[in-house]
Every structure is written in structure tokens, then in C-alpha cells.
Amino acid sequence: MDQHHAVVIGAGIGGLTAAAALHRQGWAVTVLERSASLEPVGAGIALAPNALRALDTIGLGAPVRELSAWQGDGGVRAPGGRWLARTDSAAAARRFGDPLVLLHRATFVDLLLGRLPAGTVRTATATALVRPGTQTEPARVATPDEEIEADLVIAADGVGSRVRGALFPGHPGPRFTGFTTWRMVVPGLGLRFPPHETWGRGLMWGSQPLKDGRVYAYAGALAPAGEREADERAGLLRRFGHWHRPIPRILAAVDPAAVLRHDVRAMTVPLPAYHRGRTALLGDAAHAMPPSLGQGGNQAVEDAVVLAHRLAAPATPVPEALAAYTRDRLPRTTEVVRRSLKAARLTTLGSRPAVMARDAALTAAHLLAPGLALRALDGVLDWTPPGGPDVA
């Protein structure tokens, strides 16, 4: 029987996970990436228990768990340093069966690339969908050099997905949420501190130590769409430089050129489906969400292994497998987007009375109902993949 061929558009986390999962099942896979290289920008990714169990299905769960750096407590703080709510890694592992693993995106990308044959990924290759395919006709994509037919096209081309626009031209797509985010990775400073998020008035900061000694930091603020500063680090110092330790020291060590800023857009109106014909949408292309629950990359990993699971049955036509993928993923990811938007509104409240009420509620809930923050993640982090792990 002829080997099936899949084209993956986009070599981000979701696209590479899908490629690895399909390659494991015997598919020939071509990954087309428009960027000139696969060197990920300076950012971290938090892989939650749901994604770790998904990675077990392609044999990557154990290597990722070995990179876990979170040991001990952490939680949410006020700008002056007062703890509003605390939890610890052991409690998270007990509740959800696994730790939260924070690592540099480059490390995770290298692990995924190690599961693919040499030459699978082609960089500096802009790609357009020519036709999505049908029950009887293959899909077709075009690059500057050629057109490629495939049994399957996976569009993992991000929040601004051109493929999504081609499949669903009448859909409004992701909408601006009203706030912007910054991300940065800081070299090791010899700092020892519990991981935390700090919530202020229309502002949020996160400091997360990585296992190699570096620090992944991120921030959010209410801001107009498209607003930029000549020196983003200076803007961060103005907003956060007077907050509690170690935030000022982290900011002092940031290379201004390494600060990434992005307006946050989310799929507030769900798509009608995550597929058409032989073409599937995956990750941010399908269900962009705020980073408030840290689930963007995790949901892309889930998408990838569920899609591969649905395509595993050789007798099932690809369009039928993709319809099952939509049925599996659309309700779940719509709910995760909704919960992420709710969390984003909570972390970026702008009025002083609302912030005071929020902080008081967090403190009271922590004192009266320890573990409430973890329970709020029930239904998200406790997901398990179909088919069970295959860790060989």
C-alpha cells in the first residue's frame, strides 16, 4: 500500500508535534516553514500535565519530565510582594498526576526535531493552500518553487493563519483582547526564588526559573492595539521596575533586543469546524487564546496527538478522520478559550476597587479553601489522550 503523505504548514510546537506523531505512524511528512531558520525566539513554554500525557503517545513525555524545574512552592503575589495565594508542585502533581514543566522553547523544538528524519523540515518556504482536497481528490499547496499534492494538509500557521482565511473566508478570526504581552529569557543570575505571577492594576508579571539557571519572565498590560515603544525594556522598567524582588534585578539583566512584544488576540467566535476536505487547522490557527492559563501550546500538542490518533485507522478516509478530529477538539478548545479569556480579565483588571476586591477574594480563598487555584484547573489539566501512551 502506498505511503500516505502529509504537508504541515508551520514548524511551531503544534506543527512539529503533529509531524512527529504522523511520522511515528508511518506517514511521509513534509514540514514547510516560512521563517529562515528554526531557531526559536527567546521564550519559554510551560508544558502542563495534559500536554505531558499527550507527549507520552509519541515517546516524549519522559524526556520532558526530566527537565522539570519547579520544586516547592509558588503562587500569586501583589506588586509589593505580599502573597495572595500559594500552591506547590507536589500538590499540583498529586491532583493532576504530573508536574508543570517549564523549559525554553528551543529545548522543546530540539526534542521534537529529534523525532523526525533529516530533511523533513524546509525553512524559508512560504506556502499557500491551492485546494483543500475532497473525498476523492488530494489537497494541494503551492510554494514559490512548486506545487505539492498531499493526502493531508495540516495548517499550523499561527494566529494570523492564511489557510484559516482560505477555508472560512467569512469568519472574523481572532480579535484583539485589549492587552499586550512581553516575553524574555534572562541568563542565570544566581537567583533563588519561588515561581510566581504578580497581579497589579491593569498589569501582570511572571518570573519562572528554568532548570539550567536562566529565568523566563513575561508580562501583560492593558494597552491599545499596535502600540510599540522604541525601547521596550525601558517601558517595562517604567511599569514594573518598582515592584517586588526579584523583578527589578531581572529587568536590569534583560537584553533590550531580547524583549518580545505581541498584542494578544483570541478566537472569541469559534470556527464552525477545524477542517475542510483534507485540510485541518491546528493550534493558534484554529483556537487562538490568551496566555492566562498557559494553555496555548498545550492545546496545540493535544490537537496534534488527537489528529494523529484519528488518522491511525488505515480504512478511515482522511476527510472522515478530520471530521472526527473536529468533533473531538472543537468543544474542548472552545471551553479552554473561554476560561482563558475569563482568567485574562481577572489578571488585568483596571479599576482600583475591582483590584482590591480581587486581591481580597484571592487571599480569603487561599485561607479558607487551600488548593482552590488548582481546582479551578479541573477539566483542563486532567485531560488524557485517546489511545493511551506509547512510550517505546
Image: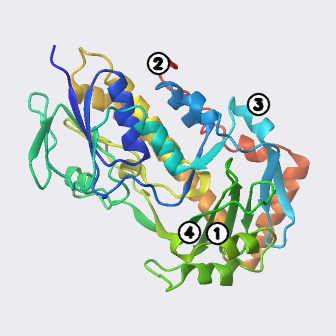
Please state which of the two labelled residues, at mark 2 or mark 1, is closer to the viewer: 2
> Separation of disc 3 and disc 2 at Cα?
23 Å
> Separation of disc 3 and disc 1 at Cα?
30 Å
According to the picture, the residue beneath numbered tag 2 turns out to be 387
Upstream in the sequence, badge 2 or badge 1? 1
Which x, y percent locates residue 288?
A: 43, 54
Please state which of the two labelled residues, at mark 4 or mark 1, is closer to the viewer: 4
According to the picture, the residue beneath numbered tag 1 turns out to be 348
Q: Amino acid at mark 1?
A: Thr
Circles 4 and 1, Cβ within 8 Å, touching? The answer is: no
Label annotation for residue 94: 3
Upstream in the sequence, badge 3 or badge 2? 3
The part of the image, by quadrant, that contains residue 3 is: top left
Label annotation for residue 190: none
> Separation of disc 4 and disc 3 at Cα?
32 Å
Secondary structure at badge 4 equals strand
Upstream in the sequence, badge 4 or badge 2? 4
Residue drawn at x 65%, y 62% as measured from the top left = 187
Residue 177 visible at all: no
Which color scheme does this rendered protein use? rainbow
The part of the image, by quadrant, that contains residue 26 is: top left
> In the rendered image, which quarter contains the N terminus?
top left
Residue drawn at x 48%, y 38% as measured from the top left = 111
Upstream in the sequence, badge 4 or badge 3? 3
Residue 187 as seen in the image, left or right of residue 83 = left
> Separation of disc 4 and disc 2 at Cα?
37 Å
Q: Amino acid at mark 2?
A: Gly
According to the picture, the residue beneath numbered tag 4 turns out to be 182
Q: Amino acid at mark 3?
A: Arg
The part of the image, by quadrant, that contains residue 326 is: top left
Which x, y percent locates residue 387?
A: 47, 18
Which x, y percent locates residue 69?
A: 71, 44
